[in-house]
Amino acid sequence: MFETALTFNDLLFLAKGAGMTLAVTAVSVAAGTVMGVVFGVIRAQFGPYWSAPLTFLLDIFRSVPLLIQLVLANAFQAIAKFGWDPFTTSCVVLSLYTAAYCTEIVRGGIDAVPVTTRRAARSLGLTWGQDMRCIVAPLATRVSLPAWIGLTLGVMKDSALVLWLGLTELLKSSQILVTRLQEPLFILLICGAIYFLISFPIARFGGYLERRWSPDD
Amino acid sequence: MLNYTFHWNQALKALPQMLEGALVTLQIAVLSMVIGLICATLLVLCRRSGNIFLTSFATVWVEVARNTPALFQIYMAHFGLGNFGIHLSPYTALLAGITFNNAGYLAENFRGALKAIPDTQPRAARSLGLTSLQAFRYIMVPQMLRVAFLPMTNQMVWAILMTSLGVTVGMNMDLAGVTQELNARSFRTFEFFAFAAVIFYLLTKSVTLGARAMAARLFRY
């Protein structure tokens, strides 16, 4: 019969790791989304030429592996003597990473709002801010939300990489247990199941929203 | 604040080594993409087959690939398979992990692209006397590729970025692995990894631009 040395305490240890994964994800997605919305509005508003430097800068975060970004940021904060702990460094890098993707999503959402609708709003006397808040925001959210949910899940999965900086998140804690108990398959399966349980329902919800809100039905 | 002397020369001297690593990275990415494409096509066929066993096999593959981290999948290939007495080298484990991931995402892309083709087309093809496989091969696939080309390019970029994860299972031949080895020897972390970042950036950019040029030629009509 199947036997395992895994105890309840070990499961608690894994749960703690999952908590760390969720904490890093929550902080990064929150900060990244705020930055992404700001950058997205800037990119949509100033057009491709004036926002080219910003586009280039954000493109770097999408073209360099996250692992290397993390290592570079960690080395840089040591060189510059910021004295950040791994959690802060991870959150900063992941936030910028999220912001880079979120900018694209927000820009896509804003571009999906017909120009005529916005001109009509302006000619009815709405200010730019009112137009943005009352006309563009609701319509753009409808287009962007499914993609944003996908991004959140992507960041949650990518946050596994912060183990390289020594942060004990879900994958690292399962790795520690593997080293101790020597049952790699079983523990990794539990770890995968936890990731799956967090990710799958939200992914399904995103898929539902996409179907529900798709413009052609 | 910046009381630190950068030693770019050391990184510059190691550049040939890192470029060799970049070649390995590219090789893994291309291999994983090719095998992934084959697997994805098979998965799509499985999903459309109507056989409950094949369908659920494909669904489980796609959902696991899409809902767990790529790093976890590589760990699974490297540490998890050891339980069955299969001991993969870091290279094979990395390739297997990325291929598994690619196949899952590509299968989902293909499914979306196939949905965009009207149902009447395969039926028309069948009534013209094509077999089911012929209809898939000559009618569905060409149209599917047109829609799925951009997602495929993105996946290729992802594959290149994912190769950097190999370093966590002891891979020392690809770009990230070579960089990490050099770093372990001299602790010039920032310099070496900045070079690696630039190389990765150039790699992904050339893939994106190359794909764009290819799409312009392939899909002119």
Image (spheres, coloured by chain):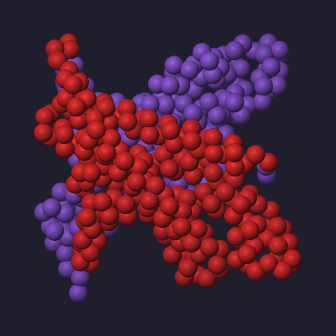
For the point 23% across and 87% down, the residue is: A1
Q: Which chain is red?
A: B
Taking depth in this image into account, of B96 and B64 the one nearest to the observer is B96
Quadrant of res B124: bottom right
Taking depth in this image into account, of B64 and B197 the one nearest to the observer is B197
Residue B18 percent location from the top left of the image = 29, 40
For the point 35% across and 44% down, the residue is: B22
Quadrant of res A178: bottom left
Taking depth in this image into account, of A60 and B33 the one nearest to the observer is B33
Using the rendered image of the protein, determine whether residue A80 is visible from the camera's viewpoint: yes
Residue B144 lies left or right of residue B95; in this view the side is right
Taking depth in this image into account, of A206 and B65 the one nearest to the observer is B65
Residue B93 percent location from the top left of the image = 31, 63
Picture colour for chain A:
purple
For the point 50% across and 25% down, the residue is: A56
Residue B58 percent location from the top left of the image = 53, 72
For the point 69% across and 27% down, the residue is: A136
Residue B74, above or below B172: below
